[in-house]
Amino acid sequence: MRKSHVKKGDTVKVTAGKDRGKNGKVLRVLRNKGLAIVEHINFIKKHVRPNPQRNVKGGIMEREAPMPISNLRVVCGDCGAAKGFNINVLEDGRKVRICKACGGQVGKTA
């Protein structure tokens, strides 16, 4: 399994692709494939066949597609910068992500 700097629930900024410059919340991380699904980013159109048993109406549906994790930068909640972060280990053994721009804590504890 690959390491990932992005976690579910992080706010990220897109650095490459058709949605470059947009911010969104990570809904799901697919670590084995190196992909992440970000809310309201990288929409695709999917043709859906009607299925009355599941109460699905047919037509063209839009949904978020996975995008490479390498195209995402984690945004600091305090300063709003997407500069990156360092990982510090606290006395009790927990790992904390620290923003390189402001020194505040990024996201939740690791």
Image: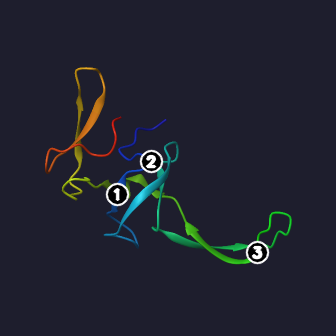
Q: Dot 1: few (<14), some (14–19), or many (≥20) neighbours within 10 Å?
A: many
Return the residue found at the far bottom: 59
Is 57 above or below relative to 109?
below
> Is label 3 or label 1 in front?
3
Residue 49: where, in percent of width, then height?
78, 72
Amino acid, disc 1: Val
Report the Cα–Cα distance between label 1 and label 2: 10 Å
Return the residue found at the far left: 102
**Regarding mark 3 in the picture, which secondary structure is present there?**
loop
**Regarding mark 1 in the picture, which secondary structure is present there?**
strand
Report the Cα–Cα distance between label 3 and label 2: 30 Å
Identify the residue under disc 3: 57
Amino acid, disc 3: Lys
Numbered label attached to residue 90: none
Q: Residue at x 18, y 45 (%)?
A: 104
Q: Residue at x 26, y 53 (%)?
A: 77
Residue 86: where, in percent of width, then height?
22, 39
Image quadrant assignment for residue 59 = bottom right
Q: In the rendered view, does 93 fall on the left or right side of 41? A: left
**Regarding mark 2 in the picture, which secondary structure is present there?**
loop
Q: In the rendered view, does 18 fall on the left or right side of 62? A: left
Q: Dot 2: few (<14), some (14–19), or many (≥20) neighbours within 10 Å?
A: some
Is 30 above or below relative to 45?
above
Residue 40: where, in percent of width, then height?
46, 68
Report the Cα–Cα distance between label 3 and label 1: 33 Å
Identify the residue under disc 2: 8
| Depth order, front residue of 21/10 | 10
Is 94 above or below relative to 3?
above
Colouring style: rainbow
